[in-house]
Image (cartoon, rainbow, N blue to C red):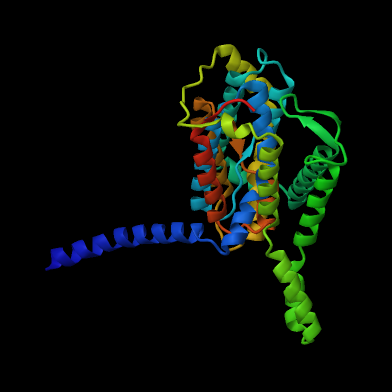
Amino acid sequence: MESQSQSGQHETPKRSRFTGMFHKLKTNLVFRSKLAEINGAMGDLGTYIPIVLALTLAKDLDLGTTLIFTGIYNAITGAVYGVPMPVQPMKSIAAVAISSSAEDFGIPEIMAAGICTGGILFVLGISGLMQLVFNIIPLSVVRGIQLSQGLAFAMSAVKYIRKEQNFSKSKSVGDRPWLGLDGLVLALACVLFIVLVNGDGEEEEEEEEGDRDGSRGRRRRVSIRKVIANVPSALLIFLLGVVLAFIRKPSIVHDIKFGPSKMKIVRISKKAWKNGFLKGTVPQLPLSVLNSVVAVCKLSYDLFPEKEFSAASVSMTVGLMNMVGCWFGAMPTCHGAGGLAGQYKFGGRSGGCVALLGVAKMVLGDRACNGG
C-alpha cells in the first residue's frame, strides 16, 4: 500500500506539469477577438514584405524556404510567449546585401551573417549576459530606440507613397502618378482610412472616461468610436492590395504553380564567413541586442504586464531561429519593438495572432512562384 501511495505521489507532478504546459499553450494561442487578431497579424507586413521581395529579386533569396521557416518561427514564438511577437528581417544585414554586388555579399554571406549573429545572441542568452544587459540599460535608451524605429517606419512609408519603388535595387525610380490603381490618391485614401479607424491610440482611455461620465450622449459617442475601432483596417487594406495586384497584372494567376519548395543546405566558404561576419554581423549585432531583445521585452512588459518571459529567453529564440533556418537559405530574422507595437495597435493581443500569420506563411511557402 505504501509503495502504491508513493508511486501515486510521484506520478501526480508529471501529470500536473503536462497539464499546466498544455493549459499555458492553449492560453497563449487563444484569440481574444477573432477579427481583431487577424487584423493585428497584418500589422508588421509593411516591414516584412518589402525587404523579403528586395532580397528575393536582388539576391535570389529562396522565397518558399523563407516563408516556411518564418511561418514556423511565428507559430513557435506565439505559442511560447503568448504575445504578438513579430518575426522581422535583420535590417542591417538586408541593407548591406541589397547595396552590395552578388559576388561581394550574396546568399552565402547573408546566411553566414545570420548564423554568426544568431550564435552570439544564443550565447548571450544562455550565459545570462543578455539579462544583465537588459537590467543595466536605462529606460530612456529603450524609448529612444522605439522613437527612432517609429520615425524610420514613418519616413519609409512616406517614401513608398510618394515614389515608385524598384525593390530589387531598393531605390526609388520616379514620382508616383496621382491617379490609377497605384496612384497617390488611392494611397492617401488608404492612409486616411487607417488614421480615421485606428485614431491616435487613446480609444481605451476615452472609453473609460465615457463609462465614468453618466451622460447618454457621451456614452453614445464612445460606443460609435468603439464600433469604428473594431473595423479591421489593416486586413481590408491588405486584401485591397492583393486584389489590385491581380487586376493590374492578371498573368500572375498563371505564373503561380503549386508544389513543395525543395530545401537545400547553403554552402558557405571561408571567405563568405569572413565577409558575412565583418559586413553583416558587426553592424547587425547592436541593433539585434537593443531592438530585437531589450526593447521588445521592455515594450512587452508595458503592453502585457501579466506575461512573464526574460530577455535571455528571447535572445535564445532569436539565436536558434537563425542557427537553424539560415543553413537552409531562410532569411536572417529577429524580433522588433516596432513590429510588436504595430501588431498590438491593429488588434493583436495573443500569440494566436502571429501563429495564424505563421500558418498562412507556411501555406504560401509550400509553392514555387515563377515569373512576375
Give the quadrant of residue 361.
Answer: top right
Depth check, front residue: 39 or 282: 39
Identify the residue at image location x=74%, y=24%.
169
Depth check, front residue: 172 or 314: 172
Identify the residue at image location x=53%, y=26%.
329
Vertical order, 193 against 331 (above or below): below
Q: Is 294 displayed left or right of 162 in the figure?
A: left
* Residue 24 percent across, percent down from the top left: 45, 59
Residue 193: tell me if it is visible. yes
Depth check, front residue: 245 or 53: 245
Vertical order, 289 against 229 (above or below): above
* Residue 158 percent across, percent down from the top left: 83, 42
Residue 290: tell me if it is visible. no
Q: Quadrant of the N terminus?
A: bottom left
Give the quadrant of residue 304.
Answer: bottom right
Number of labels in the image equals 0
Depth check, front residue: 231 or 84: 231
Q: In which quarter of the image is the C terminus?
A: top right
Identify the residue at image location x=50%, y=57%.
29
Give the quadrant of residue 112.
Answer: top right
The residue furthest left is 1
* Residue 193 percent across, percent down from the top left: 78, 56
Vertical order, 53 against 85 (above or below): above
Vertical order, 260 against 239 (above or below): above
Identify the residue at image location x=77%, y=66%.
202
